[in-house]
Each structure stands twice: as C-alpha cells, then as structure tokens.
Image (spheres, rainbow, N blue to C red):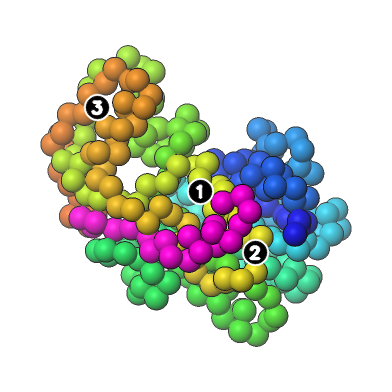
Amino acid sequence: MNHRVLVTGAGGYLGRHVVSKLLDEGHDVAAVDISTEGIDPRAHVSTHNIFGDTRGLIEEFGVPDVLIHLAWKDGFSHNSYAHMDNLSSHFVFLRTMVESGCPQISVMGTMHEVGYWEGAITASTPCNPLSQYGVAKNALRQAMILLSQSLDFRLLWLRAYYIVGDDARGNSIFAKITQAVASGAKEFPFTSGKNKCDFIDIDELATQIAVASTQDSITGIINVCSGKPMSLGDRVEQFIADHGYDIKLAYGTFPDRPYDSPEVYGDATQIQAIMAGAPYA
C-alpha cells in the first residue's frame, strides 16, 4: 500500500536518502526542511520551520498517513545546548500532528539514549544517557510514549546506531578520514580500534527506515541496525580499502575512552521481521 508521507529534516544527512527510498517505492512524499538543497525533486519539497509553522504545513500538504520525524539540530554535536533547548518544540510539533489526525508517527531515535551498555540493545534495555543528545532523545521518547497512551495513534521509535556512507556530508570518523585523504594526509591518528559497534550503510539504513515507517504490524522501539558487532579498527580498515585510500591508521595515538563499551549492537529481530515481510527487502 502506498502512503502519503511527510518527512521532516528531509534535507539532512539521512533525510535525503530516506526521501528517495520512499519515492522509489511509490509513496507520495512531502519533504520539509529549513534548507531544501539536494532533496529528490520527485517529492513535494517545501521550506518550513516546523517549530513555528505546523498549521501552515498541514494547510499546504494536508494530514499525512505517516509522519517520519528526522529533523534534529546539531545531531553530530552530542553536547550542544540545542538538544535540550529544542526538546519541548519537538514534542509540541509531534503532538500537534497527532491532534490534527496523523495516525502514524515515526521518530528517529539513537543508541545514545541508552548510554553505556555491553552486548545487544533491545527495546527493554534500560536507558542512562551520557550526553545532552542522548538525554534529549530519551526524554522525547518517554514523552511520546505517554502521549500514545492518551491519544490514538501508532508510535514507532526507530533507534539508529553507527552510520557509514555519504561521508562528505557526515561528521563521523569515516568523514574525517575522507577529509584527511583530501588534504593529502598519509596517516590518521587512531585509538586501539578494538571496540565493537553496530555499523550500517546509510543506504541500507534509509531502506529500513522507509520500510519500517510505512508498515503497521510492529510499533514501539525498533532497532534500525545490522545486528552484527564489528571492531572499529576492522570497519575503518575496510572503509579505507573499499575507497582505495592511500592512508594508514596510527593505532594507539589516542587512548580508548573509558565510557565506550567494548561491544554494543542492536538486536535486529524486529527489523529483520519487518524487512522479511516487505516486497522490496
């Protein structure tokens, strides 16, 4: 079934990929952001400040079947004050969409809601966030769960992990290596690289978000992830080899951070079930 889908943050690092995936599958997509450069032109593209013009957004596009809320300022800066400054505005926007009749809300979450954890993260894993970003996302998740108990809508909270791809636009270690290569560097300062994380390519992540957000069989917290832990060193070495970069990692230049888990990854049971039921999995 095709849906009318509204995507906020559509011009961002992840949003542009999600919009294109939705369009490829025949959904009618309204793509909204403060800056709309680079958004797939097949979408209904519009510039809106969702914190101040929610009613105007609804008047322009109507009430969508699905809202995918990706908008979030300073997502790469985990201790920016913007996370807590904007928290209530995110909630007001989402509540307004629900009160206007939107039946399904899909919100982008993060593993940073959980904080330090060893092993698989499930929907029931306790949360103790260790950054302003994690605290704000966790608070929004809790507020939305409470809202779903009093108002009639389906809530999906999509919890993401470590993203690889579209590195020129990102701010991850992969983006930093890409920048170092462009500057002519032959060596990149690195940690021991032993910590294991859940890495997922941005194209696959966008597919998971598009598929999960437009189904109604599974709701609640859904890990969008690979479900396969891999050491940071191995993944970065693979990244360098895949791109043919002439640069080497200087292992041990930086100490491993004491608050980084030796191994953490998402339990992929739910997203695998969702993808298995999708004709384009």
Query: How far apart in space, not on screen, are marks 3 and 2 (Cα)?
Result: 43 Å
Q: Nearer the viewer, residue 85 or 224?
A: 224
Q: Nearer the viewer, residue 157 or 201?
A: 201
Q: Which residue is mark 3?
A: 188
Q: Which mark is residue 215?
A: 2
| Residue 273 at x, y percent in the picture | 51, 64
Residue at x 78% of width, y 50% of height: 28
| Residue 3 at x, y percent in the picture | 76, 58
The amino acid at mark 2 is Gln
Q: Is residue 38 visible?
A: yes
Q: Which residue is mark 1?
A: 205
Span colored in magenta: 261-281
Dot in front, 3 or 2: 2
What secondary structure is found at the residue carrying circle 2? Answer: loop
- Where residue 187 sits, quadrant-wise, is top left
What secondary structure is found at the residue carrying circle 3? Answer: strand
- Determine whether label 3 and label 1 are within 8 Å by CB: no
Vertical position of residue 135 compared to residue 236: above or below: below
- Determine whether label 1 and label 2 are within 8 Å by CB: no
Residue at x 26% of width, y 21% of height: 247
The amino acid at mark 3 is Phe
| Magenta run includes residue 101 | no
Quadrant location of the N terminus in the rendered image: bottom right
Neighbours of disc 3 within 10 Å: few (<14), some (14-19), many (20+): some
Q: Is residue 137 visible?
A: no
Sequence-wise first label, 1 or 2: 1
